[in-house]
Amino acid sequence: MQTPRLTRRTFLKTSTAAAAAFSLPRFSIGQSGRGSPNGKINVACVGIANRGFFAVSELMKDPRVNIVALCDVDQRHVQDTFKRGADLKKKSELTCADLTSATLFGDYREMIAKMGGKIDAVTVSTPDHHHYPAAMTAIKAGKHVYVEKPLTHTVGEARALRDAAKRKGIISQMGNQGRATEGIRLIREWTQAGVLGEVREVHAWSPEFSDRYFIRPASLPLPAEQPPETLDWERWVGPAEMRPYHSTIAPVRWRGWWNFGNGMLGDWACHTLDGPWWALDLGAPSSVEAKVSEANGITSPEWAQVTYKFPARGKRPPVTLTWFEGPGRKPSAPKNWEDDPKKPGLPERGMFMLGEKNTLFAPIGRPDSPRLLGSATWEEFKQHRPTPTIPRVIGGPMKEWLDAIAKTGPMPGSNFEYSVPLAEMVLLGVVAVKTGKRIEWDAKSGKITNDPSLNKYIAISARDGWKV
């Protein structure tokens, strides 16, 4: 497969004109459940670098899929994706989708407007601030959506996506991959079987961003730089407040900038906290409080400690969940850690569920490999594990989503009915970290009650031309 040669002119021209000459049969699984003559799910990908290429590569491996459109604001991403796609196709033993037939766009609004009838489903793997407008544009057009975590930039956006998806009857999935793993099912099964006893405390921790994902500025504001010729900066900023380009923000170091990302909580908590949130049926917190190194409203702090309070749920006791992030910010090692085989110190990421009977530990920030603390306790437990009760996912979260679209599998585990409340919990913590203030939350009204001025961080907002 020969990689197409693109200049800035031809890339932008293609993104506005090529769709008119592109024609594929419409696939109707999403609407009628009957499949098209060619038996394919036509998928468009918004954002195709980094996590975006994960979506592209997973789709390429599925013989049910046609990748009919690719959307990105940076030519470099397009070129790199074609090259990596060609390498994958060459190495793979599967019949992969061919990217060369996909129509290229620089604007997802235009992509949906021009090719809506030829698209069944859309993946969204952009910086956080584009998740809502891209996904909502697709949902309003009746397209199934796969959206990377933390789903949206604000709580209001997340709730709006859930409501729209329900009205349209579309298949949704948030890309917190751990929700499809064996490990998270073990955490819930062991908790429900009473292995931990009552759990009143959860501790989770994460380091500061590496330089790959965020470079903390020495001073603000950053000086303006000329965007690369390959990058459409206006479209990259999109719905966010316009600011000058700087190479330490785009293309991949946006996560610590509040205009575009959600800090470390937004990047990791949908993974790390998913296990205890599901296992304990935590629901919405009643309050969130953050201690931070600095709250400047522009960049995420060097360190933060966030305390969530969850009320009692039926017979289950209240839970205090504490999140630590930044250099040296970790909880105290719990009982039985000293004889754990992974001693002596805590790893850079992890999660403890502190039960009255046993403590559960999940390393590496994901719910992949849970175990009980205390080597003797763990060895004994492995001989008498509870019987599995939760159906397993075979093939990962992307296949789970495609199976649901093709009506060969159940609703995905991280569909918006599940993932929006999870994302809401995370995003409330983001507001606390961003402002350094305590939040009292009324989940029914979707409002912060102790300081109404903070509700602006809950609402949906966008620059003119980007409101959906």
Image (tube, rainbow, N blue to C red):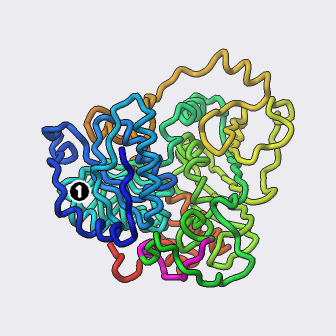
Residue that appears at 36% across and 64% down:
134
Other-residue count near label 1 (Cα within 10 Å), few / some / many at <14 / 14–19 / ≥20: many
The residue under label 1 is 142
Residue that appears at 72% across and 32% down:
358
If the image is split into quadrants, where does the C terminus sit?
bottom left
Q: Is residue 134 above or below residue 465?
A: above
Answer left or right for 161 relative to 379.
left
Q: Residue lying farthest top?
A: 383
User: Is residue 300 in view from this perspective?
Assistant: yes
**Between 273 and 28, which is closer to the camera in this rendering?**
28
Residue that appears at 46% across and 50% down:
53
Q: Position of residue 420 (x, y in %)?
A: 44, 55
> Which amino acid, by three-letter code, is at mark 1?
Gly
Tag 1 secondary structure: loop
If the image is split into quadrants, where does the N terminus sit?
top left
**Between 65 and 260, which is closer to the camera in this rendering?**
65
Please name the predominant secondary structure of the magenta segment in the image.
Answer: loop
Q: Position of residue 51 (x, y in %)?
A: 50, 52
Quadrant position of residue 367: top right
Q: Position of residue 305 (x, y in %)?
A: 72, 61
Quadrant position of residue 286: bottom right
Q: Which residues are magenta?
A: 235-247
**Between 311 and 195, which is closer to the camera in this rendering?**
195
Residue that appears at 30% across and 55% down:
69
User: Is residue 421 in view from this perspective?
Assistant: no
